[in-house]
Every structure is written in C-alpha cells, then in structure tokens.
Image: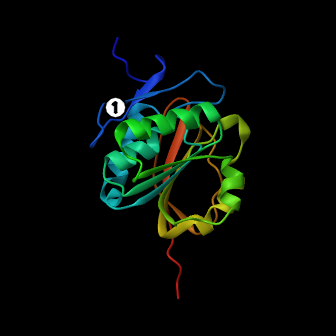
Amino acid sequence: MSGRGSNDGQVRIIGGQWRNTRLPVPALPGLRPSSDRVRETLFNWLMPRLGGARVLDLFAGSGALGLEAVSRGAAHATLVERDPQLAGNLSAIVARLGAEERVQVVQADALRWLQGSPAARADIVFVDPPFAAGLWDSVLGLLPRHLAAGAWLYLESPDGHAPVLPADWMLHREGGTREVRFALYRRAAATL
C-alpha cells in the first residue's frame, strides 16, 4: 500500500520541515481533504509568498493545508475546525510536532468565529468548506476584516461551480480535477 490520499484514512504533509508526516482523516460526513496533487500545485503557486506569512485555515478538517503552509515556511497558522474530534486530532498533531508556538487550533464554527474580532490579519486564507453546506458567500462576506492588505485566498469548490467573489479579488491561478475546482485569488490593495 502506498498510503497516499484519503482512501486509507490519512493524508501526508508533502513538503518542508514536516514532510511525510501523516495526518489522520476520520470517515466523517463532508470531510474531503485536498488531494496530494492539488496541494502540490497550490503550494507551488504559493511558495514565493509563504515565508513569514500568517495563515488562516477555515474548515481545517485534517489540517493538511494550514500545516503544509507552516511546514513550508509560514510564520503562523490558525486552524479553525467545528468538529470536536477533528479539533482534538489537530491539537494532538500540533503537540506531536512541537508546533504550539506556530499553530493555533480553534474549535469553533467558522462563520461564528469570523463574526468575532480578528486576532491578527491573515496573509493567506484557505477556504475549503464541506461542499454540501454552500458556505462560500457567507464566508466571503465575513472575511475582509480578518485579512492583511494584498492577502491571498485559496478556494475549493465542486467542479463546475465557481463562487462569485467581490470585485476586489482577482483570479491569480486556477485548476481542477474531475470533482474539484481550486483557485487562488489576490486581494487588490486598497488605493489611497
């Protein structure tokens, strides 16, 4: 067995300091970790922007996106996950990696968490919600006050469904698989 992908209940960090670290993926409704291929493409796009970045991983699930970002040089990641089992898994992984100073796990509903005051503004945000919930519009409406100027936004959605973004988001790169559309956007810096 290769142990790759989510068929065997785990995904792996594919690059950086924690390369090949396995992350558990329980069989829970709506949990659909980004594939190795999709993450490899995404992090190739993001590589020049990761050093020292503050990352926000909403709907963190397995933590693959946020932990991969820190593994590859991001300064800090906040992983927001509603499910208590998944949040507990994330906390255990962070402790095992000795990453408590660089990774914060927040067990909370992402929309409620976004309604609160931002702790720090994120340079990169990962939005990969359970597809059936249709949360893209709600998240995009609450996100701006949690973002640094010129922030980057990664979105996953079902193939054939591109969420409509506000005008200040410009498409940088996009790709797809048979099931998933993935896209990276750049927020236009505010003009004076």
Kindly tell me whether residue 99 is visible in this rendering. Answer: yes
- Rendered location of residue 129, percent (x, y): 62, 41
Which residue is found at the position 52% from the left and 66% from the top?
120
Outermost residue toward the top in this view: 1
Amino acid marked by disc 1: Thr
Disc 1 is placed on an element classified as: loop
Asked if residue 105 lies left or right of residue 82, the reply is left
From the viewer's side, name the closer residue of 167 and 190: 190
From the viewer's side, name the closer residue of 131 and 123: 123
- Rendered location of residue 189, percent (x, y): 49, 75
For the N terminus, which image quadrant?
top left
Is 97 drawn above or below residue 136 in the view shown?
A: above
Is 34 drawn above or below residue 67 in the view shown?
A: above
Which residue is found at the position 37% from the left and 18% from the top?
3
Q: How many marks?
A: 1
- Rendered location of residue 170, percent (x, y): 52, 63
Q: Dot 1 corresponds to which residue? A: 21
Kindly tell me whether residue 167 is visible in this rendering. Answer: no
Q: In which quarter of the image is residue 22?
A: top left
Which residue is found at the position 27% from the left and 43% from the top?
16
- Rendered location of residue 94, percent (x, y): 42, 41
For disc 1, the neighbor class at 10 Å (few under 14, some 14 to 19, many from 20) is: some
Is 36 drawn above or below residue 123 in the view shown?
A: above
Which residue is found at the position 31% from the left and 53% from the top?
73
Colouring convention used in this rendered image of the protein: rainbow
Outermost residue toward the bottom in this view: 192
